Structure formats: structure tokens, C-alpha cells
């Protein structure tokens, strides 16, 4: 093996065996440090007041798509083969993943393109945007495009072997098993680039507005009743309003 072969082999082992842990460490530790030291920047930095209509469409489409894609990847990659084989075959799982990935990937792509367009081409929004804001949107757009590019390659592996191979890589990473990088060796370049780009987004999260993913307002669904006070100090509690008392004239 020549010098170039040694270098590419080392680079492969680093990207798919060491880099995931580096990204995960920065993701968690960096986010905790930012939350502790710089909470006033822990926000989405919404520009809704500047242009609401396109944001409404873009944001809704993007978030619906990205949430479905995230949980699809999470359960698709980390579910052991013996678990889902009791219900469906590997080939069926592969086709389901391609179908749902195509639908929600397209939805997410449309929404993200709308968000990126308004960020780049609206002068007022562009002036209020930071370089990091624009860079993150571009990286997300590239990452999503790579994900859609993998779909034709997945159709070329309908036996599900490639999917199982990538799942084994992810499961070896999260369980700290050696030899994880070997499962990615020989896979098509869109899969490899898609993986590296995805890990890089986790690496950059603590330094961008992406930290707001930790602040999903789930608590809003379970919040306690809000007590509203009238003028004069009286308190109106939730519940049916009592009928007014009849006066003497009545």
C-alpha cells in the first residue's frame, strides 16, 4: 500500500471511527457550557416580524420534514435487525425507508429552500442575519440534498444489505464497539458524505442557533392554568362563569 493508500485508510478510520465521538462530545459539552454561560443567545433568532408569510410556510414544512427524517434515521439505524425482522423483512424496511424518506425529504427540502431564499434575498432579513445563520442554512440545504441523492443509490441496493451495513456502523458507534468504520468501507460516496456532513452539523450546533432544538416547548402542553386578575384585585379562576344575580327591580 502506497502513501496515498495509507493516508486514505487513516482518514476513513478517523472520519467514521473517531470523528463521531469528537462531534458528540462537542455537541453535549459545548451546549451545556453555552446554556450555563450565555443563555441570552439560546434562541431561534426568528425574523417573523420582518416577513411572516414565507416564514410560516417554510418553517412549517421544514420542521415537519426534519422531525420525521430525524426520528426515521434514529429508529431506522439504531433498531437491531432481529427486532424488526419479527414484523417485516429487510427488503420491506428498505423500501419503506426510501418511500418515507423521499416524501418527507421533499417536504423538508421545499421548506428549507423557502427559508434560505428569504434569508438571502430579503434585504432586511439579510441585514439582521449573521454569517453563522446563513452558513448553517446552507449546510442544512446541502445535507438534505445529499440525503435525497442517496435515494437512487438505495434503490440500487434493494436487498437491504447496504442499509444493514450502515445500521451496524451506527449501532457500533453508540455502543462503543471497535471496528465501526469497517462497516462504512466500500459504501457509495453519497452515503459517506451524508454521514460526515450530518456529524458536522452536530459539531456546529453549540455555536449556532441550532441549540434551540433542546428547547422544544413540550412543557406548553402540560402547563398549569394561568390565573388572570381583574382590575381591583379580584381573581378569575378557570371554569364556568356564574350567572349574574337578579336585582331587586327584577
Image (cartoon, rainbow, N blue to C red):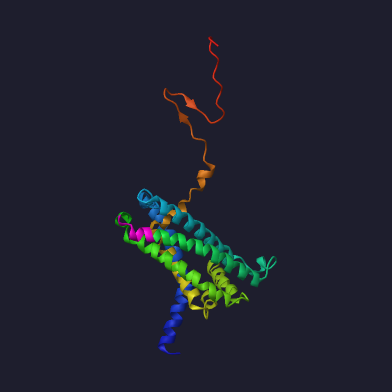
In the rendered image, residue 54, in percent from the top left (x then y), is placed at 41, 54
In the rendered image, residue 245, in percent from the top left (x then y), is placed at 55, 17
- Image position of 245 (left or right of 12): right
Q: Is residue 118 magenta?
A: yes
Q: Specify the farthest residue to the bottom.
A: 2
Q: Please state which of residues 56 and 183 is positioned toward the viewer in this rendering.
A: 56
Q: Specify the farthest residue to the top.
A: 248
In the rendered image, residue 95, in percent from the top left (x then y), is placed at 61, 70
- Image position of 75 (left or right of 56): right
Residue at horizontal 45 percent and vertical 28 percent from the top? 229
* Residue 31 sits above or below residue 245 on the image: below
> Where the N terminus falls, by quadrant?
bottom left
Let me know if residue 209 appears in the view. yes
Highlighted range, magenta: 117-123
Q: Please state which of residues 56 and 206 is positioned toward the viewer in this rendering.
A: 56
Residue at horizontal 50 percent and vertical 44 percent from the top? 220
Q: Is residue 192 magenta?
A: no
In the rendered image, residue 79, in percent from the top left (x then y), is placed at 61, 65
Q: Main secondary structure of the magenta part?
A: helix
Let me know if residue 207 appears in the view. no
Query: Residue 73 falls in which quadrant of the image?
Result: bottom right
- Image position of 96 (left or right of 144): right
* Residue 118 sits above or below residue 97 on the image: above
Query: Residue 208 falls in which quadrant of the image?
Result: bottom left
> Where the C terminus falls, by quadrant?
top right
Q: Tally the numbered discs.
A: 0
Amino acid at each position: 500500500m502506497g502513501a496515498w493508500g495509507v493516508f486514505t485508510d487513516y482518514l476513513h478510520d478517523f472520519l467514521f471511527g473517531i470523528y463521531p465521538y469528537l462531534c458528540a462530545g462537542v455537541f453535549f459539552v459545548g451546549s451545556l457550557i453555552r446554556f450555563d454561560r450565555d443563555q441570552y443567545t439560546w434562541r431561534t433568532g426568528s425574523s417573523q416580524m420582518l416577513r411572516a408569510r414565507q416564514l410560516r410556510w417554510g418553517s412549517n414544512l421544514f420542521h415537519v420534514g426534519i422531525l420525521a427524517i430525524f426520528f426515521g434515521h434514529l429508529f431506522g439505524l439504531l433498531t437491531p435487525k432481529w427486532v424488526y425482522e419479527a414484523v417485516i423483512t429487510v427488503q420491506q424496511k428498505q423500501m419503506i425507508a426510501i418511500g418515507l424518506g423521499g416524501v418527507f425529504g421533499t417536504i423538508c427540502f421545499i421548506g428549507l429552500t423557502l427559508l434560505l431564499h428569504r434569508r438571502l434575498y430579503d434585504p432586511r432579513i439579510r441585514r439582521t442575519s449573521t454569517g453563522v445563520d446563513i452558513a448553517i442554512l446552507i449546510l442544512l440545504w446541502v445535507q438534505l440534498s445529499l440525503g435525497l441523492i442517496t435515494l437512487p443509490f438505495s434503490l440500487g441496493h434493494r436487498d437491504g444489505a447496504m442499509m444493514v451495513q450502515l445500521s451496524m456502523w451506527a449501532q457500533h458507534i453508540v455502543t462503543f464497539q471497535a471496528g465501526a468504520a469497517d462497516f462504512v468501507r466500500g459504501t457509495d460516496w453519497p452515503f459517506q458524505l451524508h454521514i460526515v456532513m450530518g456529524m458536522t452539523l452536530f459539531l456546529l450546533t453549540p455555536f449556532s442557533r441550532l441549540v434551540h432544538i433542546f428547547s422544544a416547548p413540550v412543557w406548553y402542553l402540560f402547563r398549569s392554568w394561568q390565573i388572570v386578575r381583574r382590575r381591583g384585585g379580584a381573581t378569575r379562576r378557570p371554569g364556568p362563569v356564574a350567572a349574574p344575580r337578579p336585582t331587586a327591580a327584577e
